[in-house]
Amino acid sequence: MAEERILLTGASGYVGGRLLPALEASGRRVRCLARRPEALASRVGVGTEVVAGDLLAAEPLPPALEEVHTAYYLVRSAGEGRRDRAAAERFAQAAVVVGVRKIVYLGGPDPATASAGPGSCREIGRILRESGVPTLEFRASIIIGSGSLSFELVPGLVEGSPLMVTPRWVYSLAQPIAIEDVIAYLLEALAVELEQSQIVEIGGLNQVGYSEIMHEYARQRGLRRLIVPVPVFAPKLSNWWLRLVTPLYAPVGRRLIDGVRRDAVVRDVAGMRRFAVQPMSLGQAIARALRYEDGHCAATCWSDAFSSQGAERSPASAGCSARRIDSRSVQLSCSAEAAFRPIRRIGGRVGWYWGNWLWRLRGFLDLLLGGLGLRRRRRDPEYLWPGDAVDCWRVEEVKADRRLHLHAQMKLPGRAWLQFEVEEGDGGCVVRQTAIFDPFGFWGLLYWYGVYPLHALVFGGMLRGIVRAIDAELRKV
C-alpha cells in the first residue's frame, strides 16, 4: 500500500503558509488543496503535490482526499461566515466518503467566550467534530508573529500616535501564543492517535490584556505610549476606530474584535501538557516577530489568503504589521526568464523605466539630508547578487528569474523595500511589483500618505516601463 499523504488546506494563508515548509522538512508526503494551484506552485517543495479544488464549487473533492491519513483544515475567509460554514460542511462530507483517518483544525478561543454565529470558529469546529472523522481541534486566541492578523493590529495602533484612546476590550484577558509554537502543536498532532474528536486549548506563558501586548510592543520598539480607555464597549464604534487607525479590513476587524472582547485564556491545561511544546513568553514572541520583520515583510501574511478568494486589496491600505504596501501586477504571455531579464538590469545606466528625473531629484534631496543619493550605481550591468548596491538601494535577495528584493538606503522616516516577483503559469507569467514602507511613528505615516499620489505615478509608470522593456526584448528575438 502506498504511503498515506498529509492533506493541507489553506496553504496560501498565514498559518498554512508556515506549516507547509515545516511538513515538507519533516519528510512527509504532502498534498495541498488550492483554488488556484498556479499561485501556490512556486511556494512548494519538489515532492509536494498541488491539486485544484474549490470547497464551494460543484466539482467532486474525493480524488483530492484519496490516500490521505491526516487532513489539516485551515481555511478561513474574511468575514464570509456562511461561506466558511458551507466549505466546512462540504469538506467534512468528502472526508467521510474517502475515509480520511484524522482532521486537524485550528480554531478560536473557548466557545463559552466566543461567537457561535454562522461560520464562527465554534461552528466550524462543531461541523468537523460531528462529521464522523476523528477531529483534533486546537483553540488559540491571539497569535503573535510577523504577518499575523491579531499581531498586525498592535503596530497599527501603537506606531501611529503617542496617545491612544481605546475601547474597553483592550483590557480583556487573552493568552497570546507565538506562531512558532502553533506550528509545533500542529506538527505534533500527526503523532496523536484519535478514537474520537478532542479539543485542546493552547496558549503562551502569559495571560495578558491587549493593552499589555501594546505596551510590550512599544517597549521593544523604544516608544512611549499612553493608553486611555473608554469605559464602554461599542462594537460598531470599535470597528470604525480600527478602520481609522489600522490598515485592517472592516469585516476582518469585526471578527477580530469579537474574538478579544471577552476573556479568552486557556481554561483546561491538561490538553497542552500532552505535547512536548514549551510555549514562549509574550516578550519572546514579540521579539521573534520583530526579528522577522527586520529582514523584509513576513514570509506569510494574513492578507495573502485574499488572493485565493478573488478579493482585491487596495495598494494604499494593505500592510504587514504597521507597514504600508503598494502592490501591482500584470499578466504577460512570455516566459519567466524573459520577464525577469529587464528587472535584473534595473538602476544604473538602464534607470528605473519611468521618471528617471524624479529619481535623480530624490537622490539630490537625499544628499542634502546627508544621505548617499544615487551615487553608488551598480557593479555589473547585467546581473545582481545579495549585498550589491543599486543606486540608492541594496539587494537583500535575488532568485534567478523569480524574485528581486531591494532595501532602501536613502534617508526616510521609516524603512522601505522594493520587490519584484515573477510567477510562471499556463501560457505565460505574472509580474508583481511591490513597494513596502515601515513608518516610524506619526511622521512616517504622514510621509507615506503625503507622497502616496507621487508614488502611485512612479510605481505605476515603472511597471508599465518594465512591460515595454520586456516587449522590446521579445521583438529582438
Image: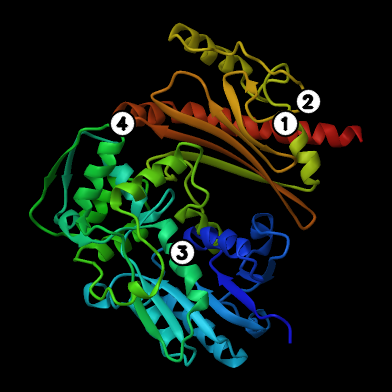
User: For mark 2, does the 10 Å Cα neighbourhood hold few (<14), some (14 to 19), or many (20 or more) residues?
Assistant: few
Which is nearer the eye, 33 or 245? 33
Which is nearer the eye, 455 or 184? 184
Q: Position of residue 107 (x, y in %)?
A: 38, 72
| SS at badge 2 | loop
Q: Position of residue 13 (x, y in %)?
A: 51, 60
Cβ–Cβ under 8 Å for marks 2 and 1: yes
Asked whether, in this view, residue 339 is left or right of residue 236, the answer is right
> Mark 1 or mark 2, which is nearer the start of the sequence?
1
Q: Label 1 is placed on what type of residue?
A: Arg
Res 50 → quadrant: bottom right
Residue designated by label 2? 382
Q: CA distance from mark 3 to mark 4?
A: 34 Å
Total residue callouts: 4
| SS at badge 4 | helix
User: For mark 4, does the 10 Å Cα neighbourhood hold few (<14), some (14 to 19), or many (20 or more) residues?
Assistant: some
User: For mark 1, does the 10 Å Cα neighbourhood hold few (<14), some (14 to 19), or many (20 or more) residues?
Assistant: many
**Mark 3 or 4, which is nearer the eye?**
3
Q: Position of residue 244 (x, y in %)?
A: 28, 45
**Residue drawn at (80%, 55%), measured in percent from left and top?**
427
Residue designated by label 4? 441
Image color mode: rainbow
Residue at the extreme top: 368
> Mark 1 or mark 3, which is nearer the start of the sequence?
3
Res 462 → quadrant: top right
Q: Which mark is residue 344?
A: 1
Cβ–Cβ under 8 Å for marks 3 and 2: no
Above or below for 126 versus 107: below
> Mark 2 or mark 3, which is nearer the start of the sequence?
3
Q: CA distance from mark 3 to mark 2?
A: 43 Å
Q: Label 3 is placed on what type of residue?
A: Ala
